[in-house]
Amino acid sequence: MTKRRPSGDGMVRKLKRGLWEGRVVIGHKKDGASIFKYAYAHTQKELGEKLRALDGAYHDRDLTEEMMLTLQTWLERWCRESLPLTMRASTAERCRAMIQNHIVPRLGQKRLADLTTDDIQKFCNELRKGGRLDGKEGGLSATMVLRVCNLLHRSLDAAVCARLIPTNPADGVQLPKRRRAQKQILNDGQLNTLLKAIEGDEDWHDFFYTELTTGLRRGEICALRWDDFDEAEGRLHVRRTLKKEDGALVCGDTKTYAGRRVILLPPSTAELLRERKRASFTEWIFPNPLRPEQPTNPTTAYENMKRILKRAGLPAIRFHDLRHTFATHALASGVDAKTLAGILGHTNASFTLDTYTHVTDDMKETASGIVGDFMEEIFGKELAPWQDARQGTA
């Protein structure tokens, strides 16, 4: 390999117009020729400081001439070579759309070597103020800005690994804080109302009863086949999800690897499916009511949920809120987070706890009361005066 510091590296000279110019070697071309990074300053001392900073930034880095690629060219290559290996086709397609709609128009012509943290910060701010594509005034939501900027950060991490840039210029960018929308969950009374509302619905009772007792994602429950149901053990195998691609419904992989799971059904749900199977003449557990050879369309399931909710006078929640309702009641009833994470198909229990913080806070209060009762049983009356004193100073 060509020496890291060939002759001419670190050259310093004073230009005719009065500026000082210096350079450091930051990489090598395929033919071994050096790639230089130049710096300019009004004084030799100032230039020395800039060169030392450059030398530190590129220390132990040996970049290639591809660092002169534009960001657009790199993103096209990254999308082509990396995205199909790391995410589902539908997710990769959404990422490509974000790149083409938001990143390329504003930063696409910037060379990787010239892209700075200030450039990306300005880009982020512009999206927040005026990044909408529908012609309306205003910017993108904080959540959307985070998605776009995180995607850009990920692509630049890959550029660092490919030795195209020394460090990721997206590091240190101040991103907007995401405001998590409050989850809409049916309380005990509303849940009972919904169960009564579906009792007489021959087409949708079994579907929504199963949903409320398993918390399956909409695409997962619509994609269930009878070979996924273990009748003897009362278990349900979640193996696929139903989604729309190019206007057609197709079965694909679950959202994550943890999405492939086996759920032990509540006895009532298992018995419901056993009875349903006896009368079934299609491979789908929940077929399209009009075309039994096809699965239920997730959009149709959503529309019928809205119809049932409206008829029952219940809040107009999303389909995914049925999943939140199941998870909330499960945690509040004492199901531990790890078990619930397995039922829901979450990658780990910490995500489940973070998602349902409001429930775990209530559980902490309940636990505090249990501990208090337990301690009083142990210490008897001796604890009472201390409790009274504490309440008096509260």
Image (cartoon, helix red, strand yellow):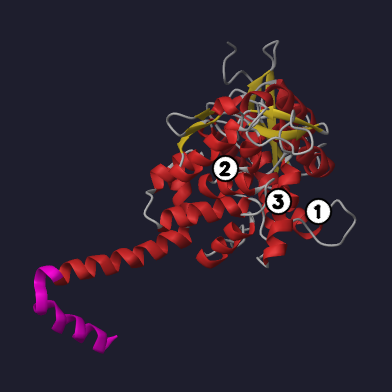
Q: Which mark is residue 216?
A: 2
> Regarding mark 3 in the picture, which secondary structure is present there?
helix
In the image, residue 150 lies at what x, y percent? 64, 43
For residue 138, above or below residue 379? above
In the image, residue 327 lies at what x, y percent? 49, 52
For residue 304, above or below residue 312? above
Residue pushed farthest bottom? Answer: 392
Main SS class of the magenta portion in the image: helix
Q: Is residue 385 magenta?
A: yes
Q: Which mark is residue 144?
A: 3
Disc 1 designates what residue? 131
Q: Residues within 10 Å of mark 1 (few under 14, many from 20)?
A: many
> Regarding mark 1 in the picture, which secondary structure is present there?
loop
Q: Nearer the viewer, residue 74 or 267?
A: 267
Say whether marks 3 and 1 touch (CB < 8 Å). Answer: yes
Q: Nearer the viewer, mark 1 or mark 2?
A: 2
Sequence-wise, the earlier of marks 1 and 2 is 1
Gap between marks 1 and 2 measured at Cα? 34 Å
In the image, residue 262 lies at what x, y percent? 47, 32
Residue pushed farthest right? Answer: 135
Residue numbers of the magenta segment: 377-394
